[in-house]
Image (tube, rainbow, N blue to C red):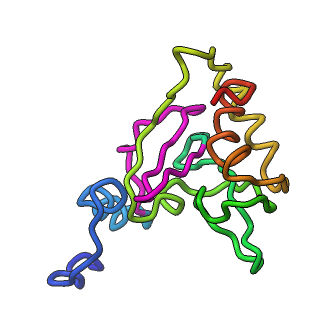
């Protein structure tokens, strides 16, 4: 009935996050989730924000752990260029779709040829243990990419 009532409506469309599969699953189960996410737990996720990249660790079930700067105004910013100087940052656990928004993303385990990736269960466990921690954030020396690579490889490799 709900689907019939929506005939003719214009809905937001995103190839990865809200397409025909998401719509059909939402109508049947009440949740717009799909099996189209191909990332594996422990993968590095590179999110293209236009002028910069944001990085996260995929932990499964459409969730990531990522490190974001806390702006001087007290608000959170999910981008690595939010503060070019040192500030505080926080490790967050969120839905991949919420973090990506309308931007594009892909898994990019960029340093697997130079550094040995740790076991995915260890990556996920340690990343989840970091959630809620407040750390020093610096765009040049310790940002979201440094955090994500540290989780995957056990050290900052960049």
Q: Is residue 11 left or right of residue 114?
A: left
The structure residue drawn at horizontal position 57% and vertical position 41%, both measured from the top left corner, is 58
Q: How many marks?
A: 0
| Res 119 → quadrant | top right
Along the viewing direction, whichever of 125 and 28 lies nearer the viewer: 125
Q: Main secondary structure of the magenta part?
A: loop
Q: Is residue 138 left or right of residue 55?
A: right
Q: Pinpoint residue 74: horizontal percent, then vertical percent.
A: 77, 77
**Residue 22, above or below 145:** below
For residue 52: magenta?
yes
The region drawn magenta spans: 32-56
Q: Which residue appears farthest toward the left when viewing the image?
A: 8
Q: Measuring 64% from the left and 67% from the top, which residue is drawn there?
A: 77
> Where does residue 131 sit, x and y in percent of width and height?
78, 51
Image quarter of the N terminus:
bottom left
Residue 135: % across, % down: 84, 52
Give the quarter of the figure containing the C terminus: top right
Percent across and percent down for residue 123 are 69, 30
Residue appearing at x 55%, y 36% in the figure? 44
Viewer-side residue, 23 vs 17: 17
Would you place residue 40 above or below residue 48 in this image? Answer: above
In the visual, does 136 lie left or right of 57?
right
Q: Residue at x 51, y 32 (%)?
A: 40
Query: Is residue 104 in the magenta section?
Result: no
């Amino acid at each position: 009935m709900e689907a019939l009532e929506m005939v003719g409506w214009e809905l937001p469309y995103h190839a990865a996050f809200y397409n025909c599969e998401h719509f059909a699953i939402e109508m049947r189960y009440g949740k717009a989730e799909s099996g189209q996410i191909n990332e594996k737990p422990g993968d590095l996720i590179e999110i293209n924000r236009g002028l910069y990249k944001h990085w996260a660790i995929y932990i499964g079930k459409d969730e990531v752990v990522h490190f974001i700067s806390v702006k001087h105004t007290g608000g959170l910013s999910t981008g690595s260029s939010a503060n070019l100087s040192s500030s505080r940052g926080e490790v967050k656990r969120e839905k991949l779709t919420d973090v990506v928004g309308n931007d594009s993303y892909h898994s990019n385990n960029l340093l697997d040829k130079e550094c040995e990736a740790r076991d995915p269960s260890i990556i996920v466990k340690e990343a989840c243990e970091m959630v809620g921690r407040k750390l020093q954030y610096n765009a040049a020396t310790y940002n979201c990419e440094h955090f994500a690579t540290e989780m995957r490889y056990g050290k900052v490799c960049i």
